[in-house]
Image: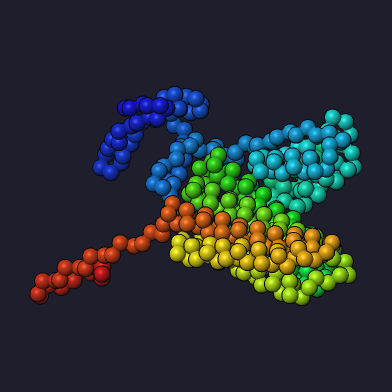
Amino acid sequence: MRSTGGFHGRRIQKTGGSTFIISLPKNWVTSRGLHAGDSLAFTPRPDGTLTVSPEEAGNPEVQRRVVLVSNEMQEEYLIRRLIAEYIAGSSLLEIRTEGRMSARTRDVVRGFAQRVIGPEILEETAESVILQDVVGANPLPIRSVIRRMHQMVRAMHTDAMAAFRDNDTSIARDVIERDWEVDRLHWFMEKQVNSALRDARVLSSLDLTLPECTTYLLTSRLLERVADHAVRIAETVQMFEKEKPPASVVTELEKMASTATQSLADALGTLERRDIPHANAIIDTVHRLVEERAHVLSEVVTRRGRIAVGLAYILESIERTALYASDLCELAINHAVESPEVTPTPRAPAPPERPGRRASATTIPS
């Protein structure tokens, strides 16, 4: 046995004809209250390591947290606290006030439960609201969540630019309201990755490595920020009121926005395919778009008042969207190096059969 820096080495021993065994460190066994005859769960990891954890007997204990809040707390502060508790991954969350919970506080908690994935109101009293996570350990495929986020973000950008072109405030309001849908998926992603970091069994159920979890979490954050810029474009529409921006500038901005959103879609494709050359080509495209920004800005600053300010906001949001696509390409390059595609090893040709020899019934064709 070797023990260095908290790591315990054990030699593999063989017993019987085909069984391999190792001993467990005594302090690890006793510190977890285990005894002879208890069961352990072994979770194989994609990197070849094996995680050992005590096997739960029956239903695992529900993780419950009690959060004490004030009725005087600002709505934004309360929502931020609830989001943090949600991401922390408690199965049962009790939001409690010292006295009777005000109608405003209760409405904020109810609204939060309706806007996130998993928590449902289990019980309400005069002083508290109890939320239970009904999703639990049944994760959604992270790659599917990322693809769904991208579809929503791209549609938001397209609609925001349509609202800008047509000066349509109803479309702009719709874009702003859809931002919550992207946020809730991003929070869910954070919650899942945090759970995977704490529990190897959750990580195994996600069918991802820890570096892949980090990559997809960063991707989710980038998409969430791109959605924020779509909202910013939509919010700018009301600044123009009945004034119409110059048609030449509108056309140029639409062209740049199309390039930015297409770069984002292509960047996501390079992440999935681990395509380093294409990722570099997209980064070059983004650099050219940033250079074009100076030309458009020189025309924007010649305008007056609210139109100039609004056009500058839209131009900046388009540029930021393109730069986030460039950031995603850099993530794709890092991901390709960290987790390259495994190519099958070519099989050696089967040796020629001897003359007159017949293949047996168990021979597998090569």
Q: Is residue 63 visible from the viewing direction of this image?
A: yes
Residue 358, relative to residue 203: is it above or below? below
Where residue 109 sits in the image (x, y, percent)?
Answer: 80, 44
Residue 255 position (above or below residue 314):
below
Task: Judge by depth and name the residue closer to the eye, 255 or 103.
Answer: 255
Q: Work out whether residue 34 or residue 350 is closer to the camera in this orientation and state it.
A: 350
Quadrant where the N terminus sits is top left
Give residue 130's position: percent from left, percent from top: 77, 40
Q: How is the image coloured?
A: rainbow
* Residue 175 coordinates in the image, percent (x, y): 77, 63
Q: Position of residue 32 (x, y in %)?
A: 51, 28
Identity of the residue drawn at 40% across and 43% down? 49
Residue at horizontal 74%, vertical 72%? Answer: 250
Residue found 70% across the figure and 59% down from its top: 316
> In the image, is 241 to the left or to the right of 327?
right
213 is higher (above) or lower (below) than 360: above
Q: Quadrant of residue 153?
A: bottom right
Q: State left or right for residue 244 relative to residue 136.
A: right
Nearest the viewer among 71 and 277 is 277
Q: Is residue 12 left or right of residue 66?
A: left
Q: Is residue 261 visible?
A: no
